Image (cartoon, rainbow, N blue to C red):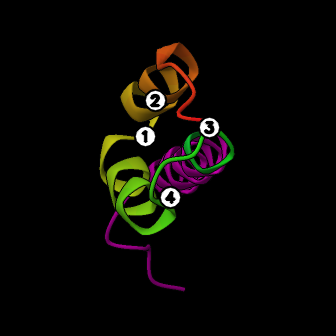
């Protein structure tokens, strides 16, 4: 059986990164921000976007 081209641990880390980004987008959306923009930011930024969403003030 051939080995995958990338270490399987990296797949788990990327999945977790995107999951955290989705949570960041949800937090930002609940604070009155644009969901689409924050979804992109969350998927790219991951943990950094999560903390930014937690620390920003609500627009509502």
Relative to 3, 25 lies left or right: right
> At which x and y percent is residue 17?
50, 45
Label 2: state its secondary structure: helix
Q: How many marks?
A: 4
Residue at mark 4 to residue at mark 1: CA–CA distance: 14 Å
Residue at mark 2 to residue at mark 4: CA–CA distance: 16 Å
Which is more N-terminal, label 4 or label 2? 4
Q: Which residue is mark 2?
A: 47
Q: Are marks 4 and 1 in contact (CB under 8 Å)?
A: no
Which is more N-terminal, label 3 or label 4? 4
Q: Which residue is mark 4?
A: 11
Q: Residue at coordinates 42% horizontally, 49% vertically from top-left?
A: 42
Q: Are marks 1 and 2 in contact (CB under 8 Å)?
A: yes
| 20 vs 51: above or below | below
> At which x and y percent is residue 27?
65, 39
Label 3: state its secondary structure: loop
Residue at mark 2 to residue at mark 3: CA–CA distance: 18 Å
Q: Which residues are magenta?
A: 1-27
Relative to 59, 10 lies left or right: left
Farthest-out residue, top: 55
| 29 vs 1: above or below | above
**Circle 2 crowding by C-alpha within 10 Å: few under 14, some 14–19, many from 20:** some
Which is more N-terminal, label 1 or label 4? 4
Residue at mark 4 to residue at mark 3: CA–CA distance: 31 Å
**Circle 1 crowding by C-alpha within 10 Å: few under 14, some 14–19, many from 20:** many
The quarter in which the N terminus is drawn is: bottom right
Q: Quadrant of residue 30?
A: top right
């Amino acid at each position: 059986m051939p080995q995958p081209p990338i270490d399987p641990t990296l797949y788990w880390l990327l999945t977790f990164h995107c999951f955290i980004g989705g949570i960041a987008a949800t937090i930002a959306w609940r604070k009155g921000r644009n969901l689409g923009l924050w979804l992109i930011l969350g998927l790219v930024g991951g943990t950094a976007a999560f903390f930014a969403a937690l620390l920003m003030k609500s627009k509502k």
